[in-house]
Image: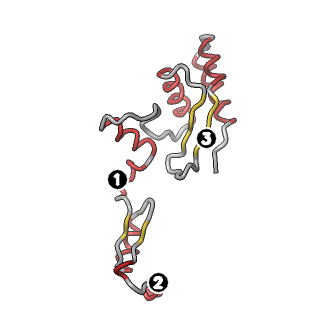
Amino acid sequence: RPRFLTRLKSLIQNPTICSLMILRGTHYENEIAKALDIPMYSAKPKDQVHGSKAGSRALFQLLNIPCADGTFSGCSQIEDLIQEILSVIKRNPLAEKGVVKLLDGFSGKGNAIVDLSNIQNAIALNESSAVLSEIMLHSLKEMEFCC
């Protein structure tokens, strides 16, 4: 939209103190900043993975920086999420609650607390993997994301 960009550029009174600040910029925002002749501040798309929860955790592990236990890759399927949570429980058998985070959420938005007490009871009873998965699925359906 060239006319819109021209109008927007005309509203910039002092380009030396103007910038475009984007949380997760793409090449589209970069093109806008170039058209407006102002700098853009954002992580490069190739580096944005490090700003995600799983990407940050993987980076911390690489640099030997302690952080809370969790997954190192995002889960896009419920079955994968269940398996990841079960593996965290195996590493932390006393865990009573867990946090499920949307990969691109920020400011606490996209976080949900998941109750692990039922799964802990099932583990103590040596329930089968299928039963553990069913209990975990039920717990995930009960969680609510903060907004």
Q: CA distance from mark 3 to mark 1?
A: 26 Å
Q: CA distance from mark 2 to mark 1?
A: 29 Å
Which of disc 1 and disc 2 is earlier in sequence? 2
Q: Position of residue 120 (x, y in %)?
A: 61, 19
67 lies above or below 93: below
Q: Position of residue 113 (x, y in %)?
A: 62, 37
Which of disc 1 and disc 3 is earlier in sequence? 1
Q: Callout 1: helix, strand or loop?
A: helix
109 lies above or below 39: above
In the picture of the structure, the residue carrying the numbered disc 3 is: 112
In the picture of the structure, the residue carrying the numbered disc 1 is: 47
Amino acid residing under circle 3? Ala
Disc 2 residue crowd, few under 14, some 14–19, many 20+, Cα 10 Å: few
Of 95 and 118, the residue lying toward us: 95
71 lies above or below 25: above
Q: In the drawing, does residue 142 fall left or right of residue 112?
A: right
In the picture of the structure, the residue carrying the numbered disc 2 is: 8
Q: Position of residue 79 (x, y in %)?
A: 55, 32
Amino acid residing under circle 2? Leu
Of 61 and 82, the residue lying toward us: 61
Amino acid residing under circle 1? Asp
Residue pictured at 38% horizontal, 62% vertical: 42
